Amino acid sequence: MNPDTQRNRQQVPLARPELGAREEELVLAVLRSGQLSLGEMGGRFEREFAAWLGVEDAVMVSSGTAALHLGVRMLGWGEGDEVVTSPFSFVASANCLLYEGAKPVFADVEEETLDLDPAAAAAAVGERTVGLLPVHIFGFPAAMPGLEALAQRHGLGILEDACEALGAIDSEGRKVGARGNLATFAFYANKQMTTGEGGMIVPRDPGEAARLRSERNQGRAVDMGWLDHDRLGFNYRLSDLAAALGVAQVEKLDSLLARRAAVARMYEQRLAGLEGVRTPVASRGAEVRSWFVYTVRLPRGADRDAVIRRLAGRGVASKAYLPCIHLFPHLRELGYSEGQFPVAEAAAADSLALPFFPAMGEAQVDRVCQELAAALGQGS
Ligand SMILES: Cc1ncc(COP(=O)(O)O)c(C=O)c1O
C-alpha cells in the first residue's frame, strides 16, 4: 500500500483523551487499596482541583449535569421560577432547571463569542426571573461582569456552566469558575481534562460545600452513619477510580491546555486561506478561550451534511455542533420555536466541529484542513 493510502486509512477522531503512566499508577493504587469509593483519592482530587483553580473548595460529583442540578437546588430555583440562559449550549444547562420545575428563559447569544448576550439577557428578565445561568460555550468566557451587574440590579442568583471552559480567563483576568459564583465543570472524555465521567461544583462558602457533599451522598452528613439521612439527597458520588484519573489529569492540566491551544493555532493558520470559513476567536482583550472543541463556521450556502459525509469517507470525523436547545421537542413544549434567537440559530446551522485533541500533530491538522478544503470545493 502506498504511504498516502495508508495515511488516509487512519481515522482522525473528533476527540481523544490523554491517558498515560501516571493515570495507570494512581488508578492501580486505588484498586490495590480496596477502597473504590468514599476513600482518600476523592478528597485529594477535590483539593488539587481547587488549588489549581485558585478557589477555597470544590466538590466532585458524578457528572457535569449532576453538578448543575445541585447548583440549581442550592440556589433554590424551582416551580414557577424563571432563569435566563443560553439557547446555544449542551442540553444539560436547560434540563437542570426542568428537573426542579424551573423554566429556562432563553436569550440570544453574542455573534463573536456565542455566549449569552448581556443586553438580550437584560431584556429577558421579567417578574418571575430568579436567576441567570450563563454557559461559557466552547471554552470562551461569558461576559460575567455585565451579567453580574444585571443580577445585582434585580437580585438574581447566578449559576455558571463552565463545563466546557476549564482554564478560560475572563475579561478581568480571572479563571472562569473562580469569581465567587456557584460554578460547574465536567470531565467527560472529550473535555480539557477527564475522569471518564465526572463533574465538579465550586461552592460559595463552607456551608454550601457541606450541603453539596451531603446531597451528592443521599443526604448523609459527613459525620453521619451509613443509613442516616438528614435531607433529600442523590447518588451523585464519583468513585475513587475516577478521582485517581482526576488527580493525574490536574497534574498535567497546564500542559494539556497549552497543547490544545497549540493545535488551535495550527488550525487557525491553515484555515486562513479557506474562503468563507470563519475560525473561532482565541482571545479578545484579557479574555482567553480554553480550547474545548475546534468549531468553524462554514461558508454561506455550504452543504454541511455533505461536508460531514465527505470527510467521514476520507476518515476524518466531524460533527454538526451545536444544535439549539430551544428547538428540542421537550423545550418546544414550553412554546419555543424557530426564529426566536437568530444569532444562536445561525451558528447552529453552519457550525462544524473538527477533530481536536492535545496529541494532534501537524500532519493530522494538515490532513483535516486539506480534506475540508476539498469538501468545500476549494482543494488545490
Ligand atoms: C455546556 C455543558 N454543560 C453541561 C454538560 C454536562 O456534563 P456531563 O456530560 O458531564 O453531564 C456539558 C457536557 O458536555 C456541557 O458541554
Image: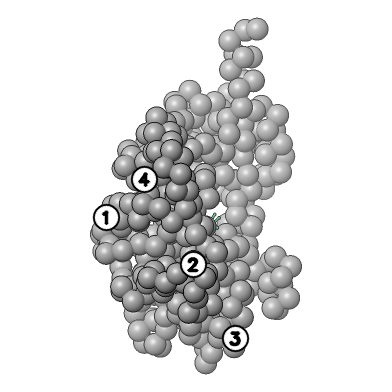
| Number of numbered tags placed on the structure image | 4
Q: Would you say 321 lies left or right of 205 here? A: right
Q: Residue furthest bottom?
A: 127
Judged from the image, the secondary structure of the residue bearing numbered disc 2 is loop
Asked whether mark 3 lies closer than 8 Å to ligand 1, one says no
Give how far apart the Cα atoms at labels 4 and 1 are. 12 Å
The three-letter code of the residue at mark 3 reads Glu
Judged from the image, the secondary structure of the residue bearing numbered disc 4 is helix
Residue that label 4 marks: 247
Q: Quadrant location of residue 373?
A: top right
Q: Quadrant location of residue 319?
A: top right
Q: Quadrant location of residue 201?
A: bottom left
Observer-side mark, 4 or 2, equals 2
Q: Would you say 199 lies left or right of 14 here? A: left
Q: Residue furthest top?
A: 1
Residue 219, image x, y percentages: 49, 73
Give how far apart the Cα atoms at labels 4 and 2 are. 27 Å
Observer-side mark, 4 or 3, equals 4
Judged from the image, the secondary structure of the residue bearing numbered disc 3 is loop
Q: Would you say 242 lies left or right of 203 here? A: right
Question: Looking at the image, which is closer to me, 212 or 64?
Answer: 212
Earlier residue among tags 4 and 3:
3
Answer yes or no: do the residues labelled 2 and 1 have beta carbons within 8 Å?
Answer: no
In the picture, the disc for residue 226 is 2
Give how far apart the Cα atoms at labels 1 and 3 are. 36 Å
Earlier residue among tags 3 and 2:
3
Question: Looking at the image, which is closer to me, 200 or 98?
Answer: 200
Judged from the image, the secondary structure of the residue bearing numbered disc 1 is helix
The three-letter code of the residue at mark 2 reads Trp
Residue that label 1 marks: 51
